[in-house]
Image (cartoon, rainbow, N blue to C red):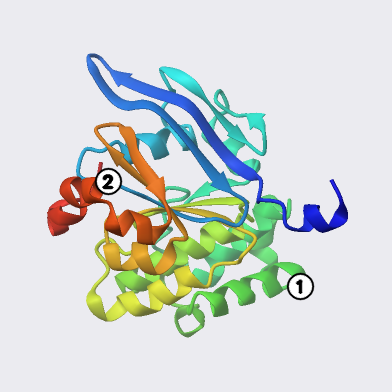
Amino acid sequence: MSPASSAHAAPTAVLQTRQLVKRFGGITATDHVSLELKQGARHALIGPNGAGKTTLINLLTGVLPPTAGHILLDGQDITELAPHERVQRGMVRTFQINQLFDSLTPMQTLALTVSRQQGLSARWWPRLGQHAAVMQRCEELLERFHLTDVMDQATRVLPYGKRRLLEIAIALACQPRVLLLDEPVAGVPTGEREQLLQTVAALPADVSVLLIEHDMDLVFSFAQYMTVMVNGGVLTEGLPEDIARDERVKAVYLGHGAEAGHG
């Protein structure tokens, strides 16, 4: 391949599922799902209630073992890896990485995460502020996620939207190659949504994002590519404008409006 042609080569797949199946007794929750997440992708996974989205994400993150099929990260089979090993390899899910420590501040929470990421373990605590690299990274994250104004407040008193922002900040502190955004605006009051939506839109370009969401405003403003699941399988996938025009999608999902939810 010439340098000119390689410069325009299609992005490689960083995350793949191959014929992924999950059965619970006689119920097939995930039915031979094959999906590709391209490098730098902004990819949305949508579907009506019970479509299998949550089961698929639990398979990707190692919370559930598959009945059949394989999961590949950067071409390496990770199907048998434990959840923490997948995080170490760069696949991170928001909102289920860590329980937020209610008594810690956003600064302390991020310092703990960044210190662990930099191999400092728990030694950061007595010398918080003495590790310049840790403090610099924390300050960058606090600013990116609009948390500077609440950085010294206990997490338990933060508005819900700020807690969600902190959870995404924790995810990014883990330096993910693949970020699974699991319904980031669910439960966030209207007045706090805009800041969160802007932050999601401004995530680093080198992080490949799979967004699981039923808020169509967020989906269509964020996604460059979409996969639609129904009854555990992939109904269709494509560009947002094609998905919006697809009569099958309208029939099984978009037309349901607020009735569509977790699944």
Residue placed farthest to the top in the image? Answer: 26
Residue 29 vs 141, above or below: the answer is: above
Q: Position of residue 87 (x, y in %)?
A: 58, 43
User: Which mark is nearer the camera, 1 or 2?
Assistant: 2
Q: Residue at x 26, y 81 (%)?
A: 191
Q: Is residue 131 visible?
A: no
Q: CA distance from mark 1 to mark 2?
A: 45 Å
Residue 24 vs 248, above or below: the answer is: above
Q: Position of residue 236 (x, y in %)?
A: 35, 42
Residue 253 vs 134, above or below: the answer is: above
Q: Secondary structure at mark 1?
A: helix
Residue 181 vs 13, above or below: the answer is: below
- Labelled disc at residue 132: 1
Q: Secondary structure at mark 2?
A: loop
The front one of 104 and 143 is 143
The front one of 87 and 120 is 87
Is residue 259 rendered to the left or right of residue 198?
Answer: left
The N terminus, quarter of image: top right
Q: Quadrant of residue 57?
A: top left
- Labelled disc at residue 47: 2
Q: Residue at x 39, y 35 (%)?
A: 56
Q: Residue at x 66, y 69 (%)?
A: 128
The front one of 127 and 116 is 116
Q: Residues within 10 Å of mark 2 (few under 14, many from 20)?
A: many
Which of marks 2 and 1 precedes in the sequence? 2
